[in-house]
């Protein structure tokens, strides 16, 4: 009983996360093209034929771009709230449109998915935890601050994709206009390295085996900086940094907290 996870892409240019067991899987968001999603999954030995659903966190383009083509080609149901669908205006075949209710577990095969509201500048934003066989994986990105929902569900996780979007100093001293800096750093924006580290160090479960730092800003952060910062506090948790250019390896998440990476090859992630 275990889950296999990978970030197929994470950043303002597109976000797509794979979570599945031996038989079935879901995608959380699909912000890269259908062709690119297929290519990256093929390199990892993963198949779209196992993907039973796409769950949509919110309507921003870097989370939904690939959904129409993927859903149509593979006839994959798309789980999306009415508010997010209204904001996205993406064409999905009606028979493939499904919804979800916050805090109520939804079954896709043997996978159990629970959505919960978060703080972000979107119509009806949600994050998700996915559970199977005593393993829970969370997707925590596009979050303005660590509200009680985020903290409570993060504590349940054996592995997590966690946003570390920006370095405070790089954002403050960078070239973005003032209004954009305020949007990013506000309570409806993104998690900073400092905020993400605080969530990790204060609320991680003892059996949190993998932390995949995600949605890094291209201009206001750097993978080496994030890796050093979190590795210094990692303990027994494996730290990985998701790329905006390439997929991560597939990580094998087990209930005991034991670690084994399915992909042993080294990827040039950055």
Image (tube, helix red, strand yellow):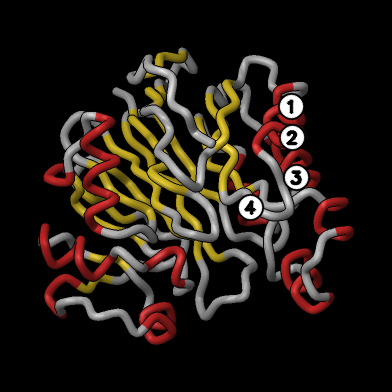
Q: Earlier in the sequence, mark 2 or mark 4?
A: 4
Residue 139 position, x and y percent, is: 49, 48
Q: Is residue 132 left or right of residue 159?
A: left
Q: Is residue 38 left or right of residue 141?
A: left
Q: Earlier in the sequence, mark 3 or mark 4?
A: 3
> Label 1, on which residue?
228
CA gap between label 2 and label 3 equals: 9 Å
Instruction: Name the image quarter holding residue 145.
Output: bottom right
Q: Earlier in the sequence, mark 1 or mark 4?
A: 4
- Residue at (69, 16) in percent of width and height: 235
The image quadrant where one finds the C terminus is top right
Disc assigned to residue 193? 3
Pair 2/3: label in front = 2
Residue 179 position, x and y percent, is: 79, 79
- The secondary element bearing badge 1 is classed as helix
Pair 1/3: label in front = 1
- Residue at (67, 52) in percent of width and height: 165
Tell me: residue 208, above or below residue 28: above
CA gap between label 1 and label 3 equals: 11 Å
* Tag 2 and tag 3, C-beta contact below 8 Å: yes
- Give the crowd class for mark 1: few <14, some 14-19, many >=20 residues within 10 Å: few
- The secondary element bearing badge 3 is classed as helix
Q: Earlier in the sequence, mark 2 or mark 3?
A: 3
The image quadrant where one finds the N terminus is top left
Q: Is residue 95 left or right of residue 130?
A: left
- The secondary element bearing badge 2 is classed as helix
């Amino acid at each position: 009983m275990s889950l296999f996870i990978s970030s197929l892409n994470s950043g303002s240019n597109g976000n797509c996360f794979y979570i599945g067991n031996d038989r079935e899987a879901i995608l959380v968001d699909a912000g890269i093209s259908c062709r690119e999603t297929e290519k990256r999954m093929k390199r990892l030995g993963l198949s779209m034929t196992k993907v039973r659903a796409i769950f949509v966190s919110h309507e921003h383009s870097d989370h939904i771009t690939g959904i129409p083509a993927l859903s149509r080609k593979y006839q994959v149901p798309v789980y999306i709230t009415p508010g997010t669908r209204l904001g996205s205006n993406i064409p999905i075949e009606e028979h493939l449109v499904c919804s979800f209710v916050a805090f109520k577990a939804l079954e896709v095969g043997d996978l159990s998915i629970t959505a919960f509201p978060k703080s972000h500048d979107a119509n009806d934003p949600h994050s998700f935890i996915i559970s199977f066989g005593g393993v829970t994986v969370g997707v925590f990105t596009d979050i303005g601050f660590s509200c009680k929902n985020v903290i409570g569900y993060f504590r349940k996780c054996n592995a997590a994709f966690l946003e570390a979007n920006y370095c405070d100093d790089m954002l403050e001293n960078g070239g973005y206009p003032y209004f954009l800096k305020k949007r990013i750093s506000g309570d409806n924006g993104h998690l900073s390295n400092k905020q993400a580290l605080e969530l990790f160090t204060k609320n991680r479960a003892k059996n949190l085996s993998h932390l995949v730092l995600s949605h890094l800003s291209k201009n206001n952060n750097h993978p080496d900086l994030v890796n050093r910062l979190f590795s210094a506090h990692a303990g027994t948790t494996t730290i990985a940094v998701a790329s905006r250019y390439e997929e991560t390896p597939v990580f094998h998440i087990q209930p005991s907290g034991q670690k084994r990476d399915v992909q042993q090859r080294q990827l040039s992630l950055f």
